[in-house]
Image (spheres, rainbow, N blue to C red):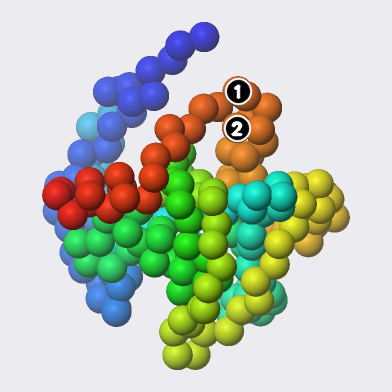
Amino acid sequence: MHFDPQPDHLVETPLRQETLWRGAFLTLHRDEVRLPDGGTARRVYLHHPGAVMVVPMLDDGRLVLERQYRYAVRRAFVEFPAGKRDPHEGGWTCAARELREETGYQADEWARAGVLHPCIGYADEEIEIWFARGLRHGARTLDEGEFLDVLALSPRELLQAVARGDVTDGKTLAGLLWWQNVAAGDFTLDWRPAAHWQRGERGA
């Protein structure tokens, strides 16, 4: 069944914007908007520069993940490698950089799967989903103050961890959904060598 993902009758039109707070990479806005029925409302939200997530696939079928402490929720999380984009940085460039810096892996082939929006109620953050294969291991270059473990789990082990409630990170669950559909043949990926993506973003 086909449906219209962007119907005009639901659009909220911005009338004015106020910046409430500006941080190192997040900005808090308060907008006045025109509602579909002609009324007005306020919308408070965070502007995010965008991020990437990588689903790295080892030759033996295992998936590379990270375990790191997330202070906001006071616990460690198992996640696919991810990170925010630097100013004017392309999606693949960010994905390759984050994978190399955090795990030490570099990939011979990459595929851009799609986009996810993890917190649509209060932020405009957009995360590009990338898949990587043909992994070659090297040295990590973690940022100062960054601490994380690198794990390699089979898809079954990861799914069992999700069922136990040990893996609850939203972007990782979305990445696993993509992986399941790719593995089942329901989703297809356009795999290209790393040099293809590098040329494309340098020329952009």
Residue at 56%, 68% in the rendered image: 137
121 on left or right of 21: right
Specify the farthest residue to the top. 1
* Measured Cα–Cα span from mark 2 to mark 1: 6 Å
In the image, what residue occupies the spot 46% across and 81% down?
141
**Amino acid at pointer 2:** Val
Q: Position of residue 197 (x, y in %)?
A: 31, 47
* Residue ID at (39%, 45%): 193
Residue 42 lies left or right of residue 61; in this view the side is: left
Furthest residue in direction bottom, as rendered = 144
* Label 1 Cα crowd, 10 Å radius (few <14 / some 14-19 / many 20+): few
Mark drawn on residue 182: 2
Whole-percent x, y for residue 43 in the image = 32, 53
Return the residue at label 1.
186
Residue 44, visible in the rendered structure = no
Seen in the picture, residue 54 relative to 188 is either above or below; the reply is: below
- Disc 2, SS: helix
Q: Is residue 22 above or below residue 191?
A: below
Amino acid bearing label 1: Asp
Direction from residue 167 to residue 36 in the image, left or right: left
Residue at x 28% of width, y 53% of height: 198
Q: Give neighbour class at mark 2: few <14, some 14-19, many 20+ (Cα, 10 Å).
A: some
Q: Nearer the viewer, residue 197 or 120?
A: 197
Is residue 96 something one can see in this rendering? yes
**Residue 196 drawn at (x, y percent):** 30, 45
Name the spot of residue 69 as percent of width and height, x first: 63, 78
The answer to whether mark 2 and mark 1 are in CB contact below 8 A is: yes
